[in-house]
Image (cartoon, grey):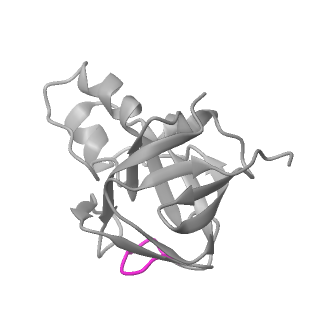
């Protein structure tokens, strides 16, 4: 598995329950998440990430155009199979350091993308991280694996 990938998009939403929209850059804050994102806070799912390959597999099956933020992911990346990384893995996302805290999540049945596409990949392939060290991330930045959960 590749040890690095590239950020395709960084996204936020101002209110919970909305799909996210791409922005030029995000500021990741320790014990908080992304500044200005509705899901930020002192909990274990501060930032959500999804691999472009996950989106591409679903896009092949549906006619609805999927765009960055459609699955309410904060960060869309290419080059890493995120859902195969173990909980506890540390990642450098742009200049921030984060730790994987959860793989997948329970998705409410009426989420916007499930209504439009008939499926949602976040419950199976999305990951969540908490921010350990402050930094910024923008499209084109690198995402890299710093260690495994056992290190």
**29 to the left or right of 70:** right
Nearest to the observer: residue 71 or residue 47: 47
Q: Residue at x 51, y 68 (%)?
A: 95
Q: Main secondary structure of the magenta part?
A: loop
Q: Is residue 36 above or below residue 146?
A: below
Q: Residue furthest top?
A: 61
Nearest to the observer: residue 8 or residue 21: 8
Q: Residue at x 45, y 52 (%)?
A: 142
Q: Is residue 42 above or below residue 124?
A: below
Q: Indicate the position of residue 68 as horizontal and vertical percent values.
A: 26, 49
Numbered circles on residues, count = 0
Instruction: Please check the rendered image and state whether residue 128 is part of the magenta-colored stretch, yes or no.
Output: no
Quadrant occupied by the N terminus: top right
Q: Indicate the position of residue 39 as horizontal and vertical percent values.
A: 45, 71
**119 to the left or right of 29:** left
Instruction: Please check the rendered image and state whether residue 38 is part of the magenta-colored stretch, yes or no.
Output: yes
Nearest to the observer: residue 68 or residue 104: 68
Residue bounds of the magenta highlight: 33-40
Q: Indicate the position of residue 37 as horizontal and vertical percent values.
A: 38, 74
Q: Residue at x 71, y 50 (%)?
A: 89
Q: Residue at x 53, y 42 (%)?
A: 4
């Amino acid at each position: 598995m590749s040890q690095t990938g590239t950020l395709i998009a960084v996204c936020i939403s101002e209110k919970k329950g909305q799909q996210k929209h791409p922005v030029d850059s995000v500021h990741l804050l320790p014990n908080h998440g992304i500044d200005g994102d509705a899901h930020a806070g002192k909990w274990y799912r501060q930032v959500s990430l999804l691999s472009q390959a996950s989106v591409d597999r679903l896009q092949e099956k549906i006619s609805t155009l999927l765009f960055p933020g459609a699955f309410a992911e904060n960060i869309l990346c290419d080059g890493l199979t995120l859902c195969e990384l173990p909980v506890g893995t540390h990642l450098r996302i742009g200049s921030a350091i984060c730790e994987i805290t959860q793989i997948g999540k329970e998705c409410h049945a009426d989420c916007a993308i499930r209504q439009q596409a008939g499926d949602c990949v976040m419950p199976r392939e999305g990951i969540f991280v908490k921010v350990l060290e402050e930094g910024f991330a923008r499209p084109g930045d690198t995402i890299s694996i710093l260690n495994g959960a056992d290190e």
